[in-house]
Amino acid sequence: MESKHPHRDEKQIESYGLAECCYTDERGWVLFPWEVTKAPIDTATLHIVNIMPGATRGDHYHPRAAEWLCPIEGEGLLKWRSGSDSDVQELCLEAHRICVKIHPGIRHAVTNIGGGELLLVAAREKDPKGDVTVPEKVESVRGEER
């Protein structure tokens, strides 16, 4: 996962390796995730997400804009699917390893699978019609349609 690769023929999720843009020395680290991706980030949507161990955040999609997730601390499991009849897919997220682009219309959620906090830097690409987030679960709850 150190290089860009779509996970399916139709682009749903792309991952980008961050080794080239993470600089570490005795003082700590500096990460420039958008340096590798060249993503057209809408800075108004830039936000930090904190997820406690075992908790899940997300369960939504963005109809017209791609969302970028960059884990900076901890471990997470990204789950997504493109429609109610498609299978749920998964990708492990590790701090400083990859940055993920979630294409428009893809339902997604991130669960903290580590022992400590999971911190993500998240942002969306510019949507000329305005930023929209639509709540919708990736995985159904007991008794709901898949």
Image (cartoon, rainbow, N blue to C red):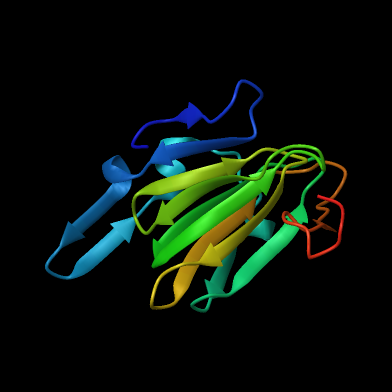
Query: Which residue is rendered at x = 44% and y = 30% of the image?
Result: 4
Occupied quadrant, residue 141: bottom right
**Residue 76 horizontal/vertical position (percent):** 47, 61
Q: Is residue 73 left or right of residue 77?
A: left
Q: Would residue 70 be found to the left or right of residue 135 on screen?
A: left
Is 146 placed above or below 119 here?
above
Which of 55 and 72 lies nearest the eye of the viewer?
55
The image shows residue 76, relative to residue 52, as above or below, that is above
Name the residue furthest front: 143
Quadrant into which the N terminus falls: top left
Q: Residue 86: image x %, image y %?
A: 74, 37
| Quadrant of residue 47 within the rendered picture | bottom right
Q: Position of residue 114 (x, y in %)?
A: 40, 70
The answer, for residue 83, to whether it is visible in the render is: yes
**Is residue 125 something one can see in this rendering?**
no
Task: Count up the numbered dots.
Answer: 0
The residue located at (65%, 47%) in the rendering is 80
**Which residue of the protein is positioned furthest toward the top in this rendering?**
9
The residue located at (64%, 28%) in the rendering is: 11
Question: Residue at horizontal 67%, vertical 38%?
Answer: 103
Q: Is residue 46 left or right of residue 137?
A: left
8 or 48: nearer the viewer: 8
The front one of 121 and 94 is: 94
Image location (x, y in percent) of residue 115: 38, 77
